[in-house]
């Protein structure tokens, strides 16, 4: 058996001695040999394992984003269908009542936006309030 010397930081050496004693190794040398053997048989470095975990996390996040995008597309299709239905089913008012109806519609729309903004927070609320101001 070859004899080798290694330098360890003081904190690492102290922790290695503590763990070797807790796990009842006959010596620090036996603990280091076991650690090296485990690392060789484990087949991957800590960096490779970290990369694998990061890749798995990114894959999971990509799947969640796809689900959210699909849900958004469903909502947009639903809204589009609802608007098309309303445009077909609701008759336009006569020309002499058009401006009065538009004014009432603006008021209802502002009330609708306020009711939505009560349920929103942060940037979404600000964005919706800006949309409402531009529509007015």
Image (cartoon, rainbow, N blue to C red):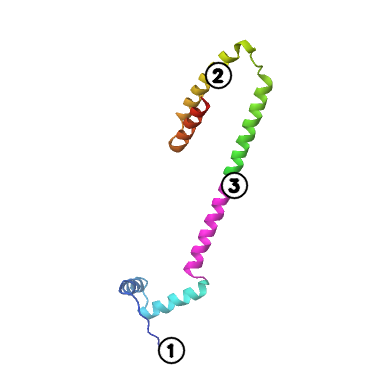
Q: Please tell me which residue is depicted at 60% across the width and 14% down the height of the picture.
A: 98
Q: Residues within 10 Å of mark 2 (few under 14, many from 20)?
A: few
**Residue 84 vs residue 8, the one in the foreground:** 84
Q: In x, y percent, where is residue 4? A: 40, 86
Q: Image quarter for residue 27?
A: bottom left
Q: Is residue 56 visible?
A: yes
Whole-Å distance between the Cαs marked 2 and 1? Answer: 90 Å
Q: Residues within 10 Å of mark 3 (few under 14, many from 20)?
A: few
Determine whether 109 is above or below 67 in the image.
Answer: above
Q: In x, y percent, where is residue 47? A: 48, 67
First in sequence, mark 2 or 1: give its number: 1
- Residue 105 image label: 2
Start and end of the magenta stretch? 44-65
Q: Image quarter for residue 2?
A: bottom left
Q: Inspect the magenta stretch and tell me whether residue 56 lies in it.
A: yes
- Residue at numbered disc 3: 66
**Residue 119 vs residue 17, the one in the foreground:** 119
- Residue 2 image label: 1
Whole-Å distance between the Cαs marked 1 and 3? Answer: 56 Å
Determine whether 130 is above or below 94 in the image.
Answer: below
Whole-Å distance between the Cαs marked 2 and 3? Answer: 37 Å
């Amino acid at each position: 058996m070859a004899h080798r010397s290694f330098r360890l930081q003081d904190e690492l050496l102290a922790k290695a001695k503590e763990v070797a004693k807790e796990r009842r190794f006959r010596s620090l040398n036996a603990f280091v040999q076991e650690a090296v053997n485990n690392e060789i048989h484990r087949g991957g470095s800590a960096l490779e394992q970290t990369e694998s975990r990061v890749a798995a996390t990114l894959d999971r996040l990509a799947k969640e984003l796809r689900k959210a995008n699909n849900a958004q597309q469903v909502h947009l299709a639903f809204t589009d269908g609802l608007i098309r239905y309303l445009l077909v089913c609701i008759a336009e008012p006569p020309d002499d009542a058009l401006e009065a109806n538009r004014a009432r519609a603006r008021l209802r729309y502002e009330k609708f936006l306020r009711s939505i903004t009560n349920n929103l927070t942060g940037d979404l609320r600000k964005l919706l309030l800006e949309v409402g101001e531009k529509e007015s």
